[in-house]
Amino acid sequence: EDVMEDVFRNLGYENVRQAERTADEGRDVIMEEVVDGTRRAIIVECKHTGTVGRPVVQKLHSAIATFDFDGPKRGMVVTTGRFTNPAQEYAQRLQQNDDPHPIELLDGEDLREIADEIGLDLYNGRIEILCNDTLRPYDPAADVDAPVAEAFRDIDNIEAADLPEPHSAVTFRPVVAVTADTNAVFETSVGVIHRINDRSRFVAHAERGQPQVVDEDVATLVTENLHATVDLDTEQFAEVFDDVEENRFGQTQTEYKEWAVERLQQHHTTTVTYTGDNNVTYNKTCEPNRSDVSVQSIEPVYLPEVRHTTDHQEYTYPYEYYTAGPSRVTAEDGIHRCVHCDTSGGDETYTYCPNCGAIACNSHTKTERLEGEPVCTGCAVTERFALKTKYFYDDQNLEAFREEYAAMPLHEKAMENKWLAG
C-alpha cells in the first residue's frame, strides 16, 4: 500500500490516500482522477502474492459498487506477481460490457515499467525518491559570478576591476512542495461551532532527519518555478561551478505525506468558545482527524543553494543564496556587513578600505588625513593633532603628516580641529 500510494501520486492522481486498515472491504488505496472535466474515484486493491485469481477481482467490483462517491467510479488491482487467466477474463468482460465499474489490472511487470517511467527505484519494499529535476542553479543569460558583482556594486570606494574572482560552490538540496486540503466540521448540541475549509501549500527541506518548512520567500521561489526545472546534470554544472554537491532525499513520499498530515492537524487545532443551551460558556478544542486532511500532491525537486566566497586581502566575504535562474533569495550576505561590528543589511552605507580590504559601516570608516581616501578604524594608525584624532594608512603616512604639521602656520594648525578653531 505504501509503495502504490507513492507510485500513484507520482503518476498524477489526486487525493491519493490509504483506506482504513481495519475492515477495508477490499479497498487498499483510494484516489481520484479528472477525465474530460469529470472527477472519478478509483478504488485500488493491492496484492503482494505470486498469483491473483478471479475472486479478488470480483470482490473489488462489489467494493466499488458500495463505495460512497458522488460520481463515476472504477477499480484497479495491483500485484507484484501475476493474474490468473480467469481473473484477466473477468476484467476484460467488464470492459467489453461497458460495466459502470470497470477494473484495470496491473501485474509485477507493469509495476516495474511504471516505476522506471516515473524515475523511482523499488528498494526494500519501499520507493525511494530519485528526483532528477532541479531549479536552475544560475541565470543562463549572465555569468555565474554576476550576483556577487551586483552585491559589491553597492559598496562605496571599490571597483569591479579590483575584485578577485570568487570561489563558487552549489549544493542541490532536496525539497518537497506539498499541496493539501483540510475540511472539517465540529458540532455540539447547539450546532456547528467551527469549520475548516482550507487549501495549504508549503515547501519543506527533505534531507535526512525531520522535514523543516522553508521560509515564505524561499517557498515562493520554489512554487513559482516548478514549471521551469532542468535536469540535474552534475557533470555539466561542474564546468560552471568550482564545487558541486548533491544531497539525497531522506524519506519516502509516504513518510512526507504522514508528516504533512500531522503538521496540518496541529496547525488547524484551535480552542473554540461557545454558549450551550443552558447559557453556560464552554471551551472545546477542535482538532481535525487524519481523515480530514487530504494530501493532493507531493512534488519533489532540487533547490540549488549557491555559495560564493571572495578572498580580498585580509578578509573573506561569503555570499549565499537559493536560486532559480535569475530569481534569488539571499541566505547569507557577508558583503553588506561591517567587519568590525554587527551592523548588516542593505539600509546602511558600507565603504571599502583599500588599506586592508575591510568593508566597514559609517561608524568604522574615516578619511585618511594625508591622502583624503577612506580608511577603516581597524587598520588605521592614529594620532591627535590640535586635540583631534587623525587617521593614517600606516606609520609612514603619519610621519609624513607630522612634518607637514610642524611646518604649518599656527592658524592652519588650529584648522585641524575646526570645532576648536570656531
Image: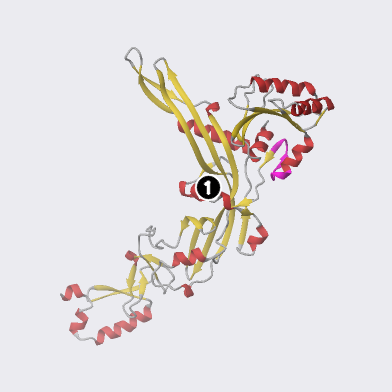
| The stretch drawn in magenta includes residue 119 | yes
Residue beneath the point at 44% across and 19% down = 187
Residue in the foreground of this view, choosing between 248 and 35? 35
Quarter assignment of residue 244: bottom right
Residue 300 drawn at (x, y percent): 60, 45
The furthest residue to the right: 85
Q: Secondary structure at mark 1?
A: helix
Residue 279 drawn at (x, y percent): 31, 14
Q: Which portion, as a residue range, is magenta? A: 116-126
Residue in the foreground of this view, choosing between 169 and 176? 176
Residue 85 visible, this orientation: yes
Residue beneath the point at 26% across and 83% down = 405
- Please state if 373 lies on the left or on the right of 234 as rendered: left
- Please state if 281 lies on the left or on the right of 164 as rendered: left
Name the amino acid type tagged 1: Thr
Q: Residues within 10 Å of mark 1 (few under 14, many from 20)?
A: some
